[in-house]
Amino acid sequence: MSDDDFMFDEEDEYEFEYEEDDGDEEVVGIETKYYNAKALREDPAAALREFQLVIDEDNSNGRSEWGFKATKQIIKLHLQARDFDKVLEFYDRMLDYVRASEVARNYAEKSINNMLERVSSNADDQFSREFYQRTLDVLKETQSERLWLRTSLRLAKILLQQAQFDELSVLLATLKRSCEDERGIIIMERGTQALEVNAVYLEMYEAQGVDKPFKDTYMQCEAVKSAVPHPRIMGYIHECGGKIYMSERCWAKAQSCFFDAFKNYDEAGSNRRVEVLQYLVLASMLSESEVNPLSSPEAKSYENEPPIRAIIDLVHAYENRDVQAFERILSSDQSAILEDDFIKRYIADLRRTFRMQAIEGIVMPYTRIRIGTLVRILAATTAEVEELLVALILD
């Protein structure tokens, strides 16, 4: 947290407009003391003392927003010092103001949201979970449903990062119920939230490596129509769909999903777009599509990225049925192409598709050809060539 961060908080911007229309000298006095305390930011111990004096005076006069603001500043100072016990002590006091409706609801929610942002970036995982749980309890009490949902999703992300899957499952089940009516049908106005919850489910199932609930959750996402989630979330959902269809060898459907995922990630400015673009090209080759996805305007701007540069060369070899170039790229560019475990799974399928196309081109001018010749040209074994020939004859 920078000094500027401490001194000038976005939620306090309006506080510099002094209003003395009612001539309330007590308010002016406590307001002045609050800003004097903030001016001591370079001396945290002195600032803590002065903010506590503001709170004491505010309590003696009947609690107001100035005590709330001073409590917030004390929390930030203790968070800066990583004194988490004190942070929780004063955060409970701050939440008491919220429970008692002693500050405006919108301002209280904004203040809580800013605190959560600070804790997420400055604290350890165990403390963050405790901080979030205390927040959720109060938000539930005060029926701040919108902020409760956003905070719950943030906590879900923390639990996911910590691989606390049992606790995460319970939280996600609660979140999912909050998006459904008594019949278990998604409430139309909460379609976006339902997709966000399911996206976390997908991340959890992918981390656990469980296929059936992973696919079931994706199909639930596909069924939600009344939603406008962030493009990054839609990008991830489409990416999951692409991976599911790839595992089922439904190459064309996977290609469509990866294209949608790439567009969403590109719109969101996510680094995932380059990785998914590789998946899109892979699915395109496997589906034997005549359309080169790298020719689209969206993809062209990434053609000089090292992983994309390598896969462009692979596409050229694939289109030209250049066996030697194809095999050379797969072996010499392993760091760029085969570094991704997902791509590795389908190299055998890609090689098989490529070899079948290559055989069709090789045998076209002839009425007879030796299997040994194909073995030599394809750099394959006799058994592999015979299997490919059988597959072509059956097709």
Image (spheres, rainbow, N blue to C red):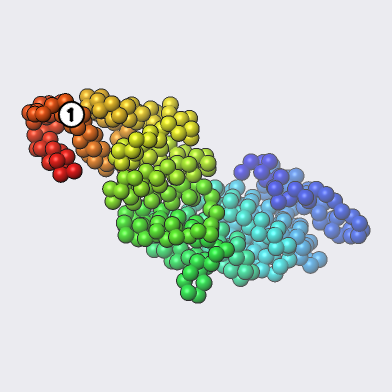
Could one spot residue 222 in this view of the protein? yes
Give the image location of residue 384, x and y in percent: 13, 37
Give the image location of residue 269, x and y in percent: 52, 39
Q: Is residue 200 left or right of residue 21?
A: left
* The image quarter in which residue 368 lies: top left
The kind of residue tagged 1 is: Met
* The image quarter in which residue 283 lies: top left
- Residue that numbered label 1 is attached to: 364
Q: Residue at x 81, y 66 (%)?
A: 61
Q: Dot 1, crowdedness within 10 Å: few (<14), some or many (≥20)?
A: few
67 is higher (above) or lower (below) than 295: below
Return the residue nearer the eye: 225 or 165.
225
Give the image location of residue 285, x and y in percent: 31, 37
Q: Residue at x 23, y 33 (%)?
A: 357
Return the residue nearer the eye: 200 or 82.
200
The N terminus sits in image quarter: top right
Q: Residue at x 89, y 58 (%)?
A: 25
Could one spot residue 56 in this view of the protein? no
142 is higher (above) or lower (below) than 130: below
Return the residue nearer the eye: 351 or 330.
351
